[in-house]
Image (spheres, grey):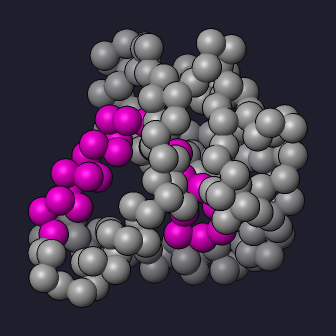
Amino acid sequence: MSTSGKLGNIYSLMIGFHGEYEATVDAKGRFLLPGGLRKQLPEGESRFILGRGFEKCLTLYPIKSWELIISKISQLNDFDPKVRQFRRQFLGGATEIELDAAGRMLLPASLKEFAGLSKDIVLAAAMDRFEIWDAAKYKQLFEDFSAEAFSSLAQEVMAEADKKQDK
């Protein structure tokens, strides 16, 4: 099945992105968007929202994915203090970025600092978005997580997914 153009957009939103991609941040805070990642994007997609991740990483949303999330967030109750706190945390620092003519992205200094990004980074697929991690921290995540712990986590998470699907 081809994943280019409109079909690619539908495919990515339904199935999700996949893969891990290494990149190098230059002295100006830019990195080249890896080709394998670019192939998964809708044709002509060059606008993204970059924000803080839930862990010490950044989250890169293609604009279409971001629009879906904003649509959900806009429906939340403004009178709930938890909603306001969530919005501040989630939307604070979110920045629109665009690929330059060479296919590079500029990481804002404040977001780069938040995630502790150094020269070597990893872009890891996370369904409808990518997480951007410092390469050493990303590697450590997997070294610190045993196969047994992963198996237990998968069992727990997937059991919850099955319960939701059965409803």
Front-most of residues 127 and 53: 53
Which quadrant holds residue 24?
top right
Judged from this view, the residue extending furthest toward the bottom is 81
Would residue 46 be found to the left or right of residue 28 on screen?
A: left
* Residue 15 in magenta stretch: no
Count numbered badges in the picture. Answer: 0
- Residue 159 screen position, x and y as percent: 37, 75
- Residue 14 screen position, x and y as percent: 32, 38
**Residue at figure coordinates x 35%, y 41% from the top left:** 65
Would residue 92 be found to the left or right of residue 74 on screen?
A: right
Quadrant of the snapshot with the N terminus: top left
What segment carries the magenta color?
53-76
Q: Considering only vertical position in the picture, is 60 above or below 73?
A: above
Which quadrant holds residue 19?
top right
Would residue 54 be found to the left or right of residue 89 on screen?
A: right
**Residue at figure coordinates x 29%, y 52% from the top left:** 69
- Residue 34 screen position, x and y as percent: 69, 27
